[in-house]
Image (cartoon, grey):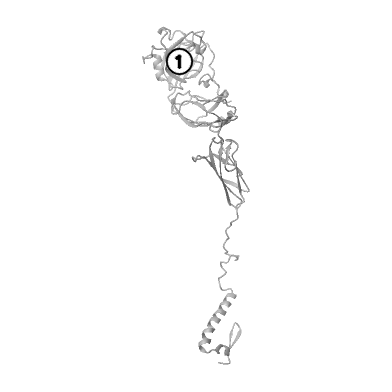
Amino acid sequence: MRGETTTVNGQPISGASAGASGKRRGGPGLRPLVLGALLLLVTACGGGDTGAGDEKGPAGSAKKEDTTASQAVVTVAPEDGAESVATSGALKIGATRGKLTTVKVSDPKGNAVEGEIAADGASWKPERHLAAATKYAVHAVAKDAEGRESAKDTTFTTLVPANTFIGHYTPEDGSTVGVGMPVSINFTRGITDPDAVERAIKVTAEPAVEIEPHWFGNDRLDFRPEKYWAAGTKVTVDLNLDGVEGRPGVYGKQAKKVSFTIGRSQVSTVDASAKRMKVVRDGKQIKDIPISAGAPATTTYNGQMVISEKLKVTRMNGDTVGFGGEYDIKDVPHAMRLSTSGTFLHGNYWGASSIFGNSNTSHGCVGLRDVRGGYDSKTPAAWFYDKSLIGDVVIVKNSHDKTIQPDNGLNGWNMDWEEWKK
């Protein structure tokens, strides 16, 4: 045994060296060496799997997370923190080297500004003007070609206008009115940008019907359908005037929603020649009333007129409508206004009962028999007053006078539909 040679991986180890220390040292010392050599051999032959999860391995290697910043850039005008920002035209949101995916603009109450991202994703614009004296928050997100997101959050505050306007509207919120009632808005300042004001007002109906606006001068805007409203229609008016620049340096300060209901249909026709009025309710005649219209020298307007005001009692003075001191009646009962210029359908207690149905004696109004004080509910004037709504239609025909002007009262029905839409 002393002359034998042991080999490991082909390298000789002398027997003398292996056993020089005796059995206690030589035996244990050889095993680690042999095992280590065998491990090296296995590794060299590729039998191990220590490199299976190495990132450099071409097959099955783990994908490295992309932490490269997005190339998309979100742009917002006005700049963050800007004040006294214009309510129209100043807000612009865009993206370069990417496309917008999310845009939110809201006021402190969380009310969102409606808008639309362009088809190419390069820009967003609001659908309408902003409110005045309001702080807005902007949150916009864009993605680049690799799908990486970039966001921008800013705030700005719109201007506080020095000069403002509002619109006085009729009918009243929550009211029930007749089928002839238009939406009529009178502005406290003359409007020089009617398109901007029109865009800020939306009138809708249920059931739906086409509704068109028409300007009378520069301070009145009316809305109506082609024909009288259908009974039972629900009409809603959105006045989004807050922040609208109606004329240079003059801004609306009104944001209000009102609604009203169309009641039953009632259309009454006054025949000035026959001196009678037929009342038609929901397509059926319910009354034929003798009347006294305008005298030959002071005839009653022809045309479609809408009751715009109801007064249990009122004073009628000729001085206020160009008739001098011809009359001054302090207690005219059951008066219903048909025009701004002073045409009324009212009770008449001072004329003899015989004139109704026989003679036209008024200064342009339509008179119905009544008693002084209007206490008798059975008189024709009291009956008609009680059965009428603001917004009911009264048509006058066969009078020796012209047709009333569409802007004289709520009487736009006297304008052709095509003309109205112009």
Residue 270 image point, x, y percent: 47, 14
Circle 1: residue type = Leu
Quick one: 249 or 112, which is closer to the camera?
A: 249
Look at the image and tell me in which quarter the C terminus lies. top right
**Which residue does the image show at 54% across and 14% down from the upper left?**
402
Percent x, y of residue 400:
52, 11
Question: Can you tell which quarter of the image residue 174 is in?
Answer: top left
Residue lying at the far right of the rendered structure: 97
Q: In this orientation, does residue 319 appear?
A: yes
| The N terminus lies in quadrant | bottom right
Residue 202 higher or lower than 371, as above or below: below
Question: Which residue matches tag 1?
Answer: 345
- From the top left corner, tell me how far across and down residue 335 is, in percent: 44, 16
**Mark 1 residue crowding within 10 angstroms, few (<14) / some (14–19) / many (20+):** many
Q: Can I make out residue 103 in this image?
A: no
Q: Secondary structure at mark 1?
A: strand
Q: Position of residue 156 (x, y in %)?
A: 56, 41
- Residue sitting nearer the eye, 100 or 256: 256
